[in-house]
Image: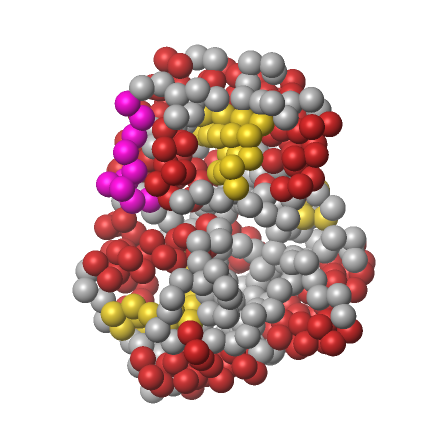
C-alpha cells in the first residue's frame, strides 16, 4: 500500500509528530511504501518530495511586520502554495490513502480538496481539539472553557483567549468559522480519535459525528526496556507550554524538599519556567535537559521513580504516559481529558486535580518516597501497555480504518 502522511512539521517536535513517525516506521516494516508532505523547515528530516513543500512560516512567536502578518494570515486561512504542493506530490506518488495529522495554520485545509479531487481516501488523526475550539486547547487564560461549543467561535475574541490578544483571537475565530462554514474538512472520510473523551467533545461540537472513530495510540514496548531496579526522582517529558502545567509541577517540588525534578522537552515557556525555579529557590533541584533523543529519554525514564503529567488542559492521549508505562514507571497526572482513560488510580498511577500544587506534591512524594510501591505500580503499568497498546493491535485497527475510508471514497465514484 502507498501511504502519504501529511503534517506541518516533519521532525520530532511533539506527540503528533512522534506518533506519525512511529506509525510510518511500522508501516514500512510491514512492506508499505510511505512518504510525507509538510512545510519546509530546517529541522525536517530529509524527505523525498521536500522541493514541493510550501515555505516555512512561524506563528510562535507571531510575525512582527505588517507584511509578515498579512502573509501569515493568508497562509492560516487558505494556503495556495500548500495546495499546489500536495497536488504535485499526490500526482507523483499516487498514494492509495492519505493520513492527515496537524495541518492547521502552516498548511491549512486547502490541501484537502486537492486530495478529494484525486479520488484518494483520507483519514485524519485528531491530535487536539482544533476543529471545536479556535485555540485548540479549551482554555480561557488558564481556566477550562467550552464557550465555543457548538460553533460559537465569536467567544474567542470576546474572551481574548489567544494570549490576551483580541486580534490573534479574532483571527483564530475567523479561521475556524470560515473553515467550518466552507466544510473545509469535508474531504476527510474518517477521523481517528485517540481518546473517548476527544471523540465525545467532537460529537458535542458537531464535527462530522458519523465519521468519528475511536483509535487509541500505541507504544513500541519492544523498543523500550523496563526498569530493572527502582529509580529516583520525578521526571516530566513533554512540551514546555502553559497548558502543560509545568509551573504547577515546579511549585509542587518547592513544597517538598525531598523531591527532585528532571524536565525533558522544549517550548515557549522554558525561560519562564527556569525563572520560576530560581524564584522559588529550587533551581538546584530542577534540571532542564531540553529535547532528548529517544534512547536518552528512555534511559531518563528508567532512572526515575515517577513521571508527572500536570496538565491544566484536556489532554487527549499523551504518548508521555504510554512511554512512561512502557519504561515501568507509574504516572501522576491530572484528572482531565483522556488521562483518566489511561491511569487506574492506585494501580498504575495516581490522579490529582489540576492547578493544585499541594495535591500534586503529596501524590509525587507518596511514590518517589516509596520505591516498593512505585515499582509495583510500574510493573502493572508495563503489563497494561503490553496488553492494550501494542503496535500490532494499533496498526490492525488503523488499516481497518483506511479500508473503511477507501470504501467511502470509492463509493463516491
Residue 180 in view of the camera:
no
Q: Residue at x 70, y 32 (%)?
A: 276
Q: Count the labels in the image.
A: 0
Q: Horizontal placement of 279 versus 129: left or right?
A: right
| Residue 224 within the magenta-colored segment of the rendering | yes
| Residue 208 within the magenta-colored segment of the rendering | no
Residue 93 percent location from the top left of the image? 31, 80
Residue 407 percent location from the top left of the image? 30, 74
Q: Residue at x 60, y 14 (%)?
A: 257
Q: Is residue 256 above or below residue 5?
A: above
Q: Quadrant of the N terminus?
A: bottom left
Q: Is residue 2 above or below residue 361?
A: below
- Quadrant in the rendering for residue 61: bottom right
Residue 28 percent location from the top left of the image? 24, 62
Q: Is residue 237 above or below residue 162?
A: above
Q: Residue at x 27, y 42 (%)?
A: 223
Q: Nearer the viewer, residue 406 or 53?
A: 53
Residue 250 in view of the camera:
yes
Residue 43 percent location from the top left of the image? 48, 60
Q: Horizontal placement of 264 versus 354: left or right?
A: left
Q: Nearer the viewer, residue 163 or 9?
A: 9
Span shown in magenta: 219-228
Q: Quadrant of the C terminus?
A: bottom left
Amino acid at each position: 500500500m502507498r501511504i502519504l502522511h501529511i503534517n506541518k512539521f516533519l521532525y520530532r517536535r511533539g506527540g503528533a509528530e512522534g506518533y506519525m513517525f512511529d506509525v510510518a516506521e511500522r508501516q514500512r516494516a510491514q512492506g508499505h511504501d510511505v512518504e510525507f508532505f509538510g512545510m519546509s523547515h530546517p529541522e525536517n528530516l530529509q524527505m523525498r518530495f521536500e522541493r514541493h513543500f510550501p515555505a516555512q512560516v512561524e506563528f510562535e512567536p507571531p510575525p512582527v511586520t505588517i507584511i509578515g502578518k498579512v502573509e501569515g494570515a493568508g497562509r492560516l486561512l487558505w494556503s495556495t502554495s500548500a495546495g499546489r504542493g500536495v497536488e504535485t506530490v499526490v500526482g507523483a506518488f499516487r498514494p492509495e490513502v492519505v493520513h492527515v495529522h496537524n495541518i492547521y495554520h502552516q498548511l491549512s485545509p486547502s490541501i484537502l480538496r486537492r486530495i478529494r479531487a484525486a479520488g484518494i481516501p483520507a483519514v485524519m488523526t485528531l491530535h487536539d481539539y482544533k476543529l471545536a475550539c479556535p485555540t485548540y486547547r479549551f482554555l480561557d487564560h488558564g481556566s477550562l472553557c467550552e464557550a465555543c461549543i457548538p460553533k460559537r467561535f465569536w467567544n474567542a475574541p470576546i474572551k481574548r483567549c489567544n494570549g490576551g490578544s483580541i486580534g490573534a483571537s479574532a483571527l483564530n475565530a475567523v479561521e475556524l468559522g470560515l473553515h467550518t462554514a466552507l466544510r473545509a474538512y469535508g474531504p476527510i472520510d474518517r477521523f481517528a480519535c485517540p481518546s473517548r473523551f476527544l471523540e465525545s467533545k467532537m460529537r458535542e461540537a458537531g464535527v462530522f459525528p458519523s465519521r468519528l472513530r475511536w483509535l487509541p495510540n500505541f507504544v513500541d514496548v519492544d523498543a523500550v526496556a523496563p526498569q530493572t531496579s527502582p529509580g529516583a526522582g520525578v521526571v516530566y517529558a513533554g512540551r514546555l507550554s502553559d497548558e502543560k502545567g509545568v509551573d504547577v509541577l515546579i511549585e509542587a517540588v518547592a513544597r517538598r524538599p525531598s523531591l527532585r525534578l528532571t524536565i525533558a522537552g522544549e517550548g515557549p515557556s522554558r525561560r519562564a519556567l527556569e525563572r520560576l525555579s530560581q524564584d522559588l529557590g529550587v533551581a538546584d533541584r530542577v534540571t532542564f535537559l531540553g529535547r532528548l533523543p529517544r534512547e536518552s529519554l528512555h534511559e531518563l525514564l528508567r532512572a526515575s521513580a515517577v513521571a508527572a503529567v500536570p496538565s491544566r488542559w484536556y489532554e487527549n492521549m499523551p504518548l508521555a504516559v504510554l512511554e512512561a508505562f512502557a519504561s515501568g514507571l507509574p504516572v501522576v497526572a491530572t484528572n482531565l481529558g483522556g488521562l483518566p482513560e489511561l491511569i487506574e488510580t492506585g494501580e498504575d498511577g495516581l490522579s490529582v486535580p489540576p492547578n493544585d500544587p499541594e495535591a500534586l506534591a503529596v501524590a509525587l512524594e507518596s511514590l518517589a518516597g516509596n520505591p516498593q510501591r512505585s515499582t509495583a505500580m510500574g510493573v502493572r503499568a508495563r503489563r497494561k501497555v503490553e496488553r492494550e497498546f501494542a503496535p500490532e493491535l494499533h496498526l490492525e485497527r488503523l488499516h481497518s480504518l483506511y479500508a473503511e475510508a477507501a470504501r467511502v471514497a470509492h463509493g463516491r465514484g
